[in-house]
Amino acid sequence: MIKATLAALGYKLSHVSELQQVSLGNFANLVEAYEQRINESATPASQLPINKLRPKLLARLLGTSPSEAYFIIQALHQCKDLNGDICEFGVAQGETSALIANEIAHTTKKKLHLFDSFEGLPKPTEKDQLINDIYALGSMDAYAGKMACSEDMVRSRMQAISFPLNRHVIHKGFIELSIENDKNLPDAVCFAYVDFDFYEPIKLALQYLHKLMPLGAIIIVDDYNFFSTGAKTAVDEFLEEKNSIEAFYSLLIPDVRYGYFAVLTKIS
Ligand SMILES: C[S@@+](CC[C@H](N)C(=O)[O-])C[C@H]1O[C@@H](n2cnc3c(N)ncnc32)[C@H](O)[C@@H]1O
């Protein structure tokens, strides 16, 4: 009964051994020291402000590692004075959305646009070959429909951190349709986290963002060379198209110990 109720909400009951328990106090201590290190080498524009809620939200992340999250956090602060809103493409249960919302809550008046079908992953295409069988399902096709979460979970995450209702928009639906039909799309975007996993929606999100991003805007694409080949192919193709005549974007692929993701900065 408890298991079924939790499963309906997208959670799983599992036994936590003593070894798996992490003290939030210890984690918060590590966060403080890590931030000190980051700030020692950061430019004034990308210095991280202290944020009391941040360690808790970092500890709750599911698909995004804390080390990748710091690239997101730094990018958000670096882009805070640029024109445009913030977007997340592929939201799931909204843990990374809460982390992003918390960073921008008091430093900007920007809106957070959250795009998700809430129906899980779509059917993969031939550009999505399985690299890492993360759920041990045996094939890429078996991932269609996986990772579905409810929109209410995202709303309650926003509520839990008191992020104002008028500062976020949930764009429910497949991105292919949302970017055509939604009435509340952003006019400009200064930072986007693209976490759709598969080739087609990622490529589409990148093309959509290209028209909306000012100079200096940043896109972080998750799962570059991880899980499906789709994310890397979409990024590589996008950059080849956009950078062929004039270099529109710089690309950073951090060491894999930070995670598997690509950082694109608009440079012209
Ligand atoms: C990996 S999860 C996102 C995880 C989230 N960013 C986080 O850090 O917790 C991928 C999400 O993308 C959504 N998604 C995938 N393809 C989509 C599409 N074509 N349109 C809308 N949503 C899509 C899925 O529903 C799923 O919730």
Image: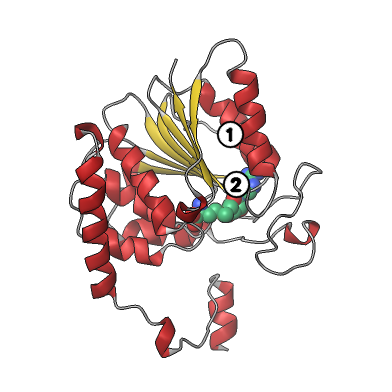
Identify the image quadrant of residue 72: top left
Decide: few, some or many residues near mark 2? Use Cα within 10 Å; few <14, some 14-19, many ≥20: many
Q: Which residue is mark 1?
A: 205
Residue in the image at 52% along x and 28% along y = 209
Q: Answer with the quarter of the image where residue 134 lies.
A: bottom right
Q: Amino acid at mark 2?
A: Phe
The amino acid sitting under disc 1 is Ala
- Place of residue 108 in the rendered image (x, y in percent of width and height, measured from the top left): 24, 37
- In this view, 83 is above or below 35: above
Q: Is residue 130 left or right of residue 87?
A: right
Seen in the image, is 33 located left or right of residue 145? left
Sequence-wise first label, 1 or 2:
2
Distance from Cα at disc 1 to Cα at disc 2: 9 Å
At x 32%, y 31%, the residue is 79
Q: Is residue 6 left or right of residue 241?
A: left
Q: Is mark 2 within 8 Å of ligand 1?
A: yes
Q: Quadrant of the N terminus?
A: bottom right
Q: Quadrant of the C terminus?
A: top left
Residue drawn at x 57%, y 85% is 3
Q: Which residue is mark 2?
A: 196
Q: Are marks 1 and 2 in contact (CB under 8 Å)?
A: yes
Crowd class of label 1 (few under 14; some 14 to 19; many from 20; radius 10 Å): many
